[in-house]
Image: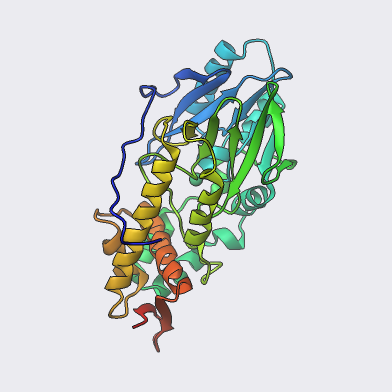
Amino acid sequence: MGSDVVMTVMQPDYPFETLAIGDTREVAPGIHWIRMALPFQLNHVNLWLLEDDGGWTVVDTGYNTEDTRAHWKRAIERIVGRQSIRRTIVTHFHPDHLGLAGWFAEEYGTQLWITYAEYLQAHLGTVDSVTHDFNRWAAFFVENGLSEDRAAAYRANKSHLGDIMTPVPARLRRLHDRETFTINGREWQVITGGGHSPEHAALYCPALRVVISGDQVLPRITTNVSLWYIEPEGDPLRAYLRSFDKFYPLPDDVLVLPSHDKPFYGLRNRLDALIAHHDQRCEAAEKACADAKTAVDIIPVLFNRMLDDHQLGFAMGESLAHLNYLVGDGRLERVRDRSNIIRYQRIA
Ligand SMILES: [Zn+2]
């Protein structure tokens, strides 16, 4: 991540107009784009329905709401008709992607295809388990400078994953990095990456020049990359940026199908811009840590807007991800004071 490069941020080239919620469009031969609603500020997610000879494939299933299930039923009636759906491929465990996998299995008899870490995290996240113990998350945020009041508000705002997703199927067909399989007679390759979730899977079809990028590469907003309390010395930003090594070799005229915003061309420009974005933020964070700072102190350096309690958790995670990246690079050190508060200090 060099800093002496003047970046011109290119607008991605969007070949399609946006879709209304529940509408569909064929964006490549046999690949149907479906846009569904999300009950957040990020108000939509893109899902994909792929034609296949032995039964269709769904890539990402959507958030578990009655509306989304109704939109799916209509779209499937219209596009799949009397043919069957045989599998759901899920990029990662987040509820806007995996939320309806259980419903698909129940309703259509689909098999879940997912990486093993995402499968395990989905099951851990939907029971009372260590990874989703929000008391411990809140305590971790307090250690990193958050006030008790805001930590309590953050905790009160968290919903249990098990309440918002249909039951995660017990059985999986495991996806492996770099493995290939066919959909509709064409080869697809799995590209895994960390940083946003433990083992996110993107899918690339060389013959169609299409990559379903999930949340790993997004055209307009940046992917959330958060440190988790279970791994306080983790370096998710490095894992995230490292995954780009697998995307750069893709042909530059590849059509990227992201989970948010719209399909786009210009993958390499986007990767360059994302690297520059994180580079700038790391520099700003490093500068701010000339005097020791907590992760909370660094939030306004990284985000120039007000954050509600839902966004606060993402912002804390993101701030810590940048700070730990700088620790990994030997640019900052992590210091715990006598009242048990963690601060980051620039190494002169
Ligand atoms: Zn996600």
Image point 28% across, 78% down: which residue?
290
Task: Please state, as top left, top right, bottom left or bottom right, where the N terminus lies in the image.
Answer: bottom left
Q: Tell me the quarter of the image containing the C terminus.
A: bottom left
Can you tell which quarter of the image residue 150 is in? bottom left
- Quadrant in the picture for residue 298: bottom left
**Residue 199 vertical position relative to residue 23 in the rendered view, above or below:** below
Q: Residue at x 45, y 67 (%)?
A: 325
Q: Residue 138 at what x, y percent from top left? A: 44, 66
> Depth check: 118 or 312 in front?
118
Q: Work out whether 201 lies above or below 230.
A: above
Decide if residue 43 is in sight here.
yes
Q: Is residue 321 above or below residue 342?
A: above
Q: Nearer the viewer, residue 109 or 330?
A: 330
Q: In the rendered view, does 89 fall on the left or right side of 344?
A: right
User: Is residue 94 at all visible to an observer of this figure?
Assistant: no
Q: Say whether residue 268 is left or right of residue 124.
A: left
* Colour logic: rainbow
> In this image, 197 relative to 333: left or right?
right
x%, y% of residue 340? 42, 83
Callout count: 0
Residue 154 position within the rendered picture, expressed as x and y whole percent measured from the top left: 39, 59
Q: For the point 44% across and 76% down, which residue is it?
A: 330
Q: Which percent across, then down, holds residue 31? A: 55, 22
**Going 39% across and 22% down the picture, which residue do you hit?**
16
